[in-house]
Amino acid sequence: MTVHPTAVVEDGAVLGAGVEIGPFCHVGSRVVLDEGVRLRSHVSVTGITHIGKACDLYPGVVLGGDGQIRNNIFTEGKLDIGESCVLREMVSMNVGSLKGGGLTRVGANGYFMANSHVGHDCRVGEGVTFANSVALGGHVEIGDGVIFGGLSAVQQFCRVGKGAMVGGLTGVNRDIIPYAMAFGDHAELAGLNLIGLKRRGLSRDTINAMRATFRSVFYGDGGGMAERARAAKAQFPGIAEVAEIADFILADAKQELCLARRRGVSE
């Protein structure tokens, strides 16, 4: 463990083996840094914050600040970050709020580029990629492996399903189903994230079933969207990814679903 002489580590902070704390960093009294965490320089970690092993924090990162809520007086909010995450310059993440259950959680192996932000009470899955200046409002849920293009933003209480890709400069104000690709001034589905599906090693039969599900749910005739989602799940009972899409649509959600473009859809 190495701590630069210009760094401030408050009494009570817990530092694991091999932790590196660089110049002008600040570590609060209720912070836990697991084995091998690296704070390069000018990093501030406060609040009730736990950072998993082997995370790499670049200059200007600010973690554990209070939820950005008017008249917020809650002092017991927590932030939990999984192992092996990379947080580039000026990334910020807030602790949870009283209303939201008190916990902001970020999964392992995430890559967060410069100036990206995770708001209070968010649930972010594993293996996500946030390009520069991506912003999540409070209470947002992000599935595993989601990719955000630069300068995209997600409104409070929205969900983005596993494996989805959100294009740059996209404003997300509705829920995005798993494995979809969405972009636009206000997000619209532009089909499935086919490149991402192939990178996951999914079989041709699985991808074809997912494409058929997408077409039937968003462009099918007869019944409502929920009914068509149930029918797709029944049609492809052995394909977990189809079930994920259907279950996402059928879940009790706080936001409406992001819908598909009427024309020019890429499936």
Image (cartoon, rainbow, N blue to C red):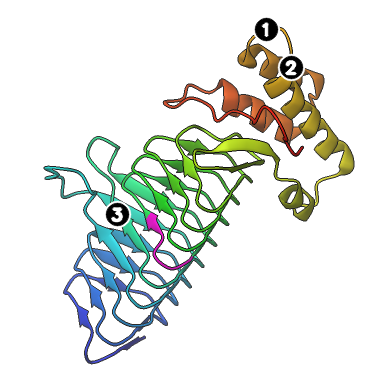
Alpha carbon separation for disc pair 3 and 2: 41 Å
Marker disc for residue 94: 3
Give the side of residue 75 with respect to residue 18, left or right. Answer: left
Q: Residue at x 39, y 45 (%)?
A: 122
- Mark 3 or 2: in front is 2
Residue 148's spot in the image, x, y percent? 54, 53
Q: Position of residue 158 (x, y in %)?
A: 44, 35
Could you tell me which quadrant the N terminus lies in? bottom left
For the residue pair 55 and 213, the one nearer the viewer reads as 213
- Please, what secondary structure does the residue beneath circle 3 have? strand
**How many residues crowd mark 3 within 10 Å: few (<14), some (14–19), many (20+)?**
many
Magenta stretch in the rendered image: 113-117
Estimate the x, y position of residue 171 in percent, counting from the top left.
46, 43
Q: Secondary structure at mark 2?
A: loop
Is the residue under label 1 in contact with that under label 2 (CB below 8 Å)?
Answer: yes
Residue 260 on the magenta segment: no
Kind of residue sitting beneath label 3: Asn
| Horizontal and vertical percent position of residue 30 | 22, 63
- What residue sits 53% from the left and 38% below the top? 187
Which residue has dot 1 on it? Answer: 223
Residue lying at the far front of the rendered structure: 263
Residue in the image at 55% along x and 62% along y? 109
Q: Which residue is mark 2?
A: 220
Establish if 50 lies above or below 3: above
* Residue 131: assigned label: none
- Residue at 42% x, 60% y: name it: 133
